[in-house]
């Protein structure tokens, strides 16, 4: 079955850029909406944005000026970049697959990767 | 942004109890409402999509209902493995937004 795996640095310095990659295995990246979601320690879920396999993107306006999501269909990967990070960006970051047939419900998730912003 | 408000924020229940969680949207989202279960230290799991459709592999004791602005998630007979935090999410329009979560604890 389809599995997602996040990868990237666990520690980022304030004002630097956060970059994470999600590798899709066991299936194709085509025909789905690929999202990034984050969860600060002890808090709820925040949708960061998605990329459709064609490259079309949609971002949360709360992060829009700092976030970009890209896809590499040849590698079955998609990535997120968040610029100028602060301590408020410390969170567990998840990648997930959204299916329009499920009203965009996210039916496959990565295990999550913890990112800490600290000097 | 569409605000999603869940109630209660937490509840205590016993094994075998019927549990109902409510989610209210700040405007109509028709049936674009999903429910997730998250256990401690784990990724969320999709339980219900399109307000009332049971995701494959999810036990039938979970059910969802509602449309427009008011939705419910019901667990007909709470099992030990159901103690977790539950989130609703609207995908009617971006930014997709989640409720604040409802923590279901053992009584």
Image (cartoon, rainbow, N blue to C red):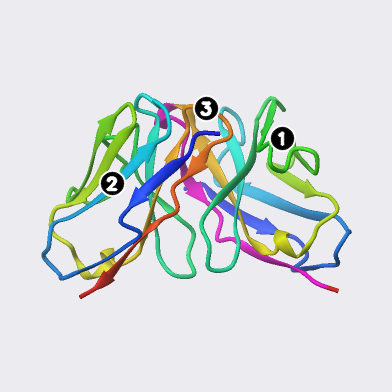
Q: Which mark is residue A50?
A: none
The tag on residue B93 is 3
Q: Tell whether position A65 is magenta.
A: no
- Above or below — where is A37 with respect to A43? above
Q: Nearer the viewer, residue A16 or A20?
A: A16
In this picture, which residue range is highlighted in magenta?
A101-118
In this rendering, do the residues under marks 3 and 1 share a single chain?
no
Q: Chain of mark 2?
A: B
Q: Residue at label 1?
A: A73
The residue nearer to you, when weighing A104 against A15, is: A15
Q: Position of residue A15 (x, y in %)?
A: 88, 59
Which tag, 2 or 3, sits closer to the chain's start?
2
User: Do residues under tags 3 and 1 come within 8 Å of each other at their CB atoms?
Assistant: no
Q: Residue under mark 3: which chain is it in?
A: B
Q: Is residue A105 left or right of residue A22?
A: left
Residues at discs 1 and 2 both on one chain:
no
Q: From the viewer's perspective, is A116 left or right of B97?
A: right
Q: Return the mark for residue B22.
A: 2
Q: Is residue B6 above or below residue A12?
A: above
């Amino acid at each position: 079955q389809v599995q997602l795996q996040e990868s990237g640095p666990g520690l980022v310095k304030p004002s630097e850029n956060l970059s994470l990659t999600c590798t899709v295995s066991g299936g194709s990246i085509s025909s789905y909406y690929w999202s990034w979601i984050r969860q600060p320690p002890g808090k709820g879920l925040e949708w960061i944005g998605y990329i459709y396999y064609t490259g079309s993107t949609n971002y949360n306006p709360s992060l829009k000026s700092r976030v970009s999501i890209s896809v590499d269909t040849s590698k079955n990967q998609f990535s997120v970049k968040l610029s100028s990070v602060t301590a408020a960006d410390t969170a567990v970051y998840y990648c997930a697959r959204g299916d329009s047939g499920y009203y965009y419900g996210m039916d496959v998730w990565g295990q999550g990767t913890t990112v800490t912003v600290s000097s | 942004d569409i605000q999603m408000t869940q109630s209660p924020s937490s509840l205590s229940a016993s094994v075998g109890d019927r549990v109902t969680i409510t989610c209210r949207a700040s405007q109509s989202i028709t049936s674009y409402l999903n429910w997730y279960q998250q256990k401690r230290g784990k990724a969320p799991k999709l339980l219900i999509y399109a307000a009332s459709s049971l995701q494959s592999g999810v036990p039938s004791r979970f059910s969802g209902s509602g449309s427009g602005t008011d939705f419910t998630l019901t667990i007909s007979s709470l099992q030990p493995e159901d103690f977790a935090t539950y989130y609703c999410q609207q995908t009617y329009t971006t930014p997709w937004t989640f409720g604040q979560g409802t923590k279901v604890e053992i009584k």
